[in-house]
Image (tube, rainbow, N blue to C red):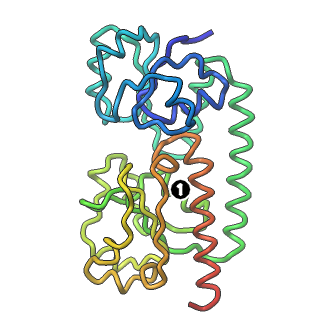
Amino acid sequence: MGPKRIICLTEESTEWLYLLGESERIVGISGYTVRPKQARLEKPRVSSFLDGKEDKILALRPDLVIGFSDMQAALADRLIRAGLSVWITNQRSIEEIFQTMDMLASLVGAQERAKQWIDQCREEHDRISERAKSWGPPLRAYFEEWDDPMISAIRWVSELMALAGAQDVFEHLSQQSLGKHRIVESSHAVVDANPQIIFGSWCGKKFRPERLKAREAWGNIDAVKNDLLFEIKSSEILQPGPAALSDGLRRMHQRIAEAWHLYDAGV
């Protein structure tokens, strides 16, 4: 039932198919794939995020190619013109991620396993949210997706921070789907927002807290004063799929809990 030779141009669809027990359908993956680890050992890598090895993709004879977002539109267009079936998803919110996961599960006939995973995930989200609410008002948080220019959190990250116990200081920007529309207007805008905790996830590049601390006037920010700057790996938070909804959320919740205890102690 469903496609039997799938190429995943981004990581989240690969991880989801493995979780569903449908990994045998995958014939090619993104070179950035790290979840699960065995995928890198078992599957040929055929793409970066923006581009792909079209000759290798065609040679693998996929009956479905799955990608994500407008950023892969050019690659998708070329593959479609080459005669392949291509599905590009564009999920931006937590709910849209769940819906996309459900659609992929339906394509491969794994609805029951998907429902079990999604139901358990929603239950965990509820538990985390209730725990965070018991602490009191949410902490002010800044999430930096890129450093130059400074790009703030995409929508699902902003929503996950809210579940974890923090309020995105640039929540209004998170509604913008494109990174270029989430550029923070100036370094001083973050100073003025005065976040109590800062997360960094520089799209695969190592987060350098010392660079943030060195920015003009950032020493006045509560998060910097209290050394509450944390990296969340992009593989855990910037892929709109299972990782962000599970490990990414847990990681943020843990760090926010640490910050809460610090502030609650009167720092």
- Which residue is drawn at the image coordinates 57% and 26% (left, top)? 103
Q: Which part of the image, by quadrant, shows the C terminus?
A: bottom right
- Which residue is drawn at the image coordinates 33% and 80% (left, top)? 218
Residue for badge 1:
159
In the displayed structure, does residue 130 sit left or right of residue 220?
right
The quarter holding residue 10 reads: top left
| Residue 231 drawn above or below residue 101 | below
Check the image and name the residue furthest to the bottom: 266
| Residue 128 drawn above or below residue 197 | above
| Residue 263 drawn above or below residue 122 | below
**What secondary structure is found at the residue carrying circle 1?**
helix
x and y, in percent, of residue 244 in the image: 55, 48
x and y, in percent, of residue 207 in the image: 39, 61
- Which residue is drawn at the image coordinates 69% and 45% (left, top)? 121
In the displayed structure, does residue 194 sit left or right of residue 121?
left
| Residue 101 drawn above or below residue 267 | above
The quarter holding residue 68 reads: top left
- Crowdedness of circle 1 by 10 Å Cα count: few (<14), some, many (20+)? many
Q: Which part of the image, by quadrant, shows the N terminus?
A: top right
Identify residue type, mark 1.
Answer: Glu
Q: Nearer the viewer, residue 243 or 139?
A: 243
x and y, in percent, of residue 126 in the image: 71, 55
Q: Nearer the viewer, residue 32 or 50?
A: 32
x and y, in percent, of residue 51 in the image: 29, 29
